[in-house]
Amino acid sequence: MSTRLSQHDAPIYDALQQFKSKRIVPFDVPGHKRGRGNPELTAFLGEQCVSVDVNSMKPLDNLCHPVSVIKDAEELAAEAFGAAHAFFMVNGTTSAVQSMILTACKRGDKIILPRNVHRSVINALVVCGAEPVYVNPDMDYKLGIALGMKISQVEKAIKENPDAKAILVNNPTYYGICSDLQGIVKLAHENGMLVLVDEAHGTHFYFGENMPITAMAAGADMAAVSMHKSGGSLTQSSFLLMGPAINVGYARQIVNLTQTTSGSYLLLSSLDLSRRNLALNGKEIFAHVTSLSQYARDEINKIGDYYAYSSELINGDSIYDFDATKLSVHTLDIGLAGIEVYDILRDEYDIQIEFGDIGNILAYVSVGDRERDIERLVSALAEIRRRYKTDKAGLITQEYIDPQVITTPQYAFYAEKELLPLRETIGRVCSEFVMCYPPGIPILAPGEKITQEIVEYIEYAKEKDCTIIGPEDLEIARLNVLTEVR
Amino acid sequence: MDLWFSESHTPNVRLSIKVDKQLYSAQSEFQRIDVFESEEFGRFLTLDGFMMLTEKDEFIYHEMITHVPMSVHPNPKKVLIIGAGDGGVVRELVQYQSIEHIDLVEIDEMVIEAAKKYLPQTASKLDDPRVHIHIEDGLKYIRFCENEYDIIIVDSTDPFGPGEGLFTREFYGSCYKALKEDGIMVNQHESPFYDEDVAAMQRAHQRIIECFPISRVYQAHIPTYPSGHWLFGFASKKYHPVKDMNASVWKSNNIATKYYNSNLHKGSFYLPNYVQKLLTEVENKGDE
């Protein structure tokens, strides 16, 4: 980075502005040529927007091999996040997560991870052939949510698998639960293992005050950060952060295995501008978001029966810290599953929240929210309680089921299989994913045994109208199972 | 000097009023507030550039939103007004001896201050001892009220900007909860004429019929509002707006009105065919 640059700069954005002013005649892709070739799209997205949907070229650098403005922007991002290096990612945080795992593990390597990971993690194991060693996350049985990993359980997993190459941590979880990152990093490094952090929901930790510790500050080796979630960039844009111990050149080769060679400048500039905005204004922005969430929690808890939880859950181990910007609300005490409240909010109150699971809803509160919208959400919840409150008998509380891993995800995914009706799969080994989306945490992953309990859970989730995805059969009436197990 | 205030009623239609001078202009936390003086309409108040009231025609709006529910409810004692910082509804209400307590919930204190200073015609009775002013978001205020009011009058701005929460199902449902078992809610119901207003009007009607067993719409003509053809909603737990109206009891209050009378009350619930059709459309939607 040239010494002149500071967090006030946005090199990719500046280069695009300059590029526009030069009015260069395009005889390169994209073929819409600044939107002229697709007037309908231009009218819809706006001329400003399509005019910077351009291809890599010398003045704009190249995402696969950055040497100028993208390199500068990456260095500024690394500085802002306290990382040794930062990659701009345009294939989603999914690709950032996969690149971390592929950088750390090869075929047959072991990786220690909690089972409540995002599907992208297990997808990466299908791609690279690494072997998962699951640490069962601690559970809060009343709320029905999976928590962080206990240090003692990580220790046990390390002892039993001293040859593991890495440990992956979800931090925070979708619900805002943080593990003891520093403790895990210390244990892992003492045992020669890398620490990878899926920090998809933790971008704001790097910029707000009084936030849980970030992966980079805790000494983790890599982290995948969804800038588009709490950071304000466009959907699908993300950062992959590296600690000092990682070979950046090798990591870039891994990233380039699967990332597009036509990196979108809309996404790249959105990352660049969002990084600048957070570096300059992040403290105020996230103080505001935290106070909005806290206000909403206080008001929701006044309604009665709902439980909007926060840092009072902290237990020093599996809930080492809590992300107070998250607005998670337990709904079972009004007699409705979270997914039912989620549907009522959308269908009857025109309010779209992030997700509803079996026992909870999560409303995503961010820099874009207004106080009056928070009032609407709280009032709608009060009304739903008034109109629907019933006995909670018949509602399932627990969401997490311990998996029985029979074989690796990669083996199971590619093995000979047969498609059977759901009930007939009990006792067999699944070759595909089953998950409610969101949150996208697998109920079954390839290579796991299907039990009666799991089948009943899937049936219940279907009955409650959860969106279940993953299997080949979109109706989820049948599942693919292995014909034989190696 | 040629100074005009203009408001777009649609992208293709505007109403302009020649202004003599601007009396007040301020930006509050919520909106821009202006008061103008004009030859034709006297003083007028605008919020974010939208006409709220003029001295010349405000009596129509304030009489129709107040006296209609007051002549149907047999014994109204406690009334909640949401919005209405200009004081017009309060001015009408305090004429009733039976009223014991009025809560006025206005989100923007600066509207009340501006009205007190520049619009004495409407704000004159805001100091009545029965009036209790709460500076708060209406949706929030009503969230925790239960079985408390005989009448709720929703004098909102349009369904965008600070007033948008007052056109939602959560708001109307909360009003239902805040009313006593024979309570009545009356609301500013937008216009049936221009397309954009029609959509807002239908949505409000849809949301109200989901919350109240009785829901009717009545009309008035208000020259300075878009199209001049304006609607009000009458939602009730028990009383019918026409059958349960008591003209002789209302008369005994001896309230002088310029627009409202008991025949007009009945007539205002008889709507033009095109309006009736718009309302029936959303009413049938609920049955599907």
Image (tube, coloured by chain):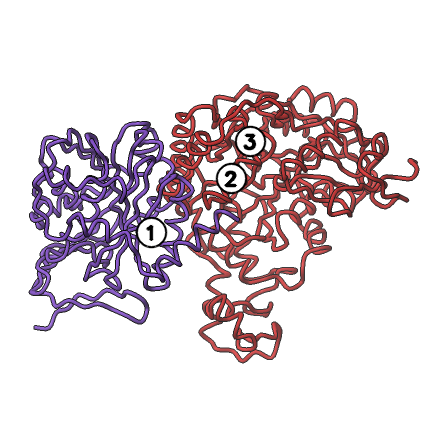
Towards the viewer: A379 or A219:
A379
Where is residue A136, by image quadrant? top right
Do tags 1 and 2 sit on the same chain? no
How crowded is the residue under tag 2: few (<14 C-alpha within 10 Å), some, or many (20+)? some
Which tint was used for chain B? Answer: purple
Left or right: B194 in relation to B260: right
Residue A310 appears in view: no
Chain letter for mark 3:
A
Question: Relative to A143, is B69 above or below?
Answer: below
Towards the viewer: A325 or A425:
A425
Query: Helix, strand, or loop for circle 1?
Result: loop
- Between the residue at mark 1 and the residue at mark 2, the CA separation in whole angstroms equals 22 Å
Q: Position of residue B277 (x, y in %)?
A: 39, 59
Three-letter code, disc 2: Ile
Residue tagged by mark 2? A344
Query: Helix, strand, or loop for circle 3?
Result: strand
How crowded is the residue under tag 3: few (<14 C-alpha within 10 Å), some, or many (20+)? many
Q: Position of residue A296 (x, y in %)?
A: 41, 33
Residue visible at 10% across and 48% down in the picture: B257
Query: Helix, strand, or loop for circle 2?
Result: helix
Where is residue A395, by image quadrant? top right
Residue tagged by mark 3? A360
Q: Position of residue B44 (x, y in %)?
A: 13, 57
- Between the residue at mark 3 and the residue at mark 2, the CA separation in whole angstroms equals 14 Å
| Sequence-wise first label, 3 or 2 | 2
Three-letter code, disc 1: Pro
Which tint was used for chain A? Answer: red
Residue A23 appears in view: yes
Q: Which image quarter holds the C terminus of chain A? A: top right
